[in-house]
Image (cartoon, helix red, strand yellow):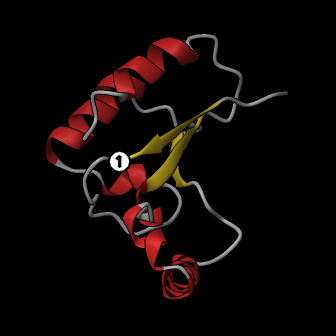
Amino acid sequence: MESSRIAIKFRRPFLLPYGDNQQNHLSGEDRKRWDTLFGKEPQIALNRQIRSLPIRKIEELAERATKLDPTYTAIRPNFATFYEINFGREVKEVEELANLVRTWP
């Protein structure tokens, strides 16, 4: 079975621990949006996108890259804002869901 996912880069610092199942930490309007979009389906999760290294190590590598090439600072992304929604199953309405997620901060 193939599973679907949507990659997300939040536009503002998102005050969530960088980890998996972060939908459980959403509050206020963000929680309302999540519940509106996905309801209470337990197989749908808001997860960190980068799993190969802890976020602290990724930030250390980005800092090292900045020291090696000062021009990197201008384009350096905040990797802690990269998440994905994993559906745990194939979803036929991915494009529709992606459009709705675009309204997030």
Q: Amino acid at mark 1?
A: Phe
* Helix, strand or loop status at disc 1: loop
Q: Is residue 45 visible?
A: yes
For residue 70, side relative to residue 31 (left or right) = right
Residue 51, relative to residue 96: is it above or below?
below
- Residue at 50 percent of width and 88 percent of height: 67
- Residue tagged 1: 10
Quadrant hosting residue 65: bottom right
Q: Quadrant of the C terminus?
A: top left
Residue, x 35% and y 28% (percent of image)? 102
For this view, does 62 lie left or right of residue 103? right
What is the residue that sits farthest to the right in this orientation?
1
The image shows residue 24 at horizontal and vertical percentages of 37, 53
Reply above or below: 13 against 97.
below
Asked if 80 appears above or below 9 in the picture, the reply is: below
On the image, which quarter does residue 5 sit in?
A: top right
| Residue 71 screen position, x and y as percent | 45, 71
Q: Which of 20/73 is in front?
A: 73
Residue 4 in percent (x, y) is at: 67, 29
Q: What residue sits 20% from the left and 50% below the top?
A: 27
Would residue 11 appear left or right of 49 to someone viewing this image?
A: left
**Residue 46 visible in the current orientation:** no
Q: Residue lying farthest left?
A: 28
From the viewer's side, name the closer residue of 49 and 17: 49
Residue found 46% across the figure and 23% down from its top: 98
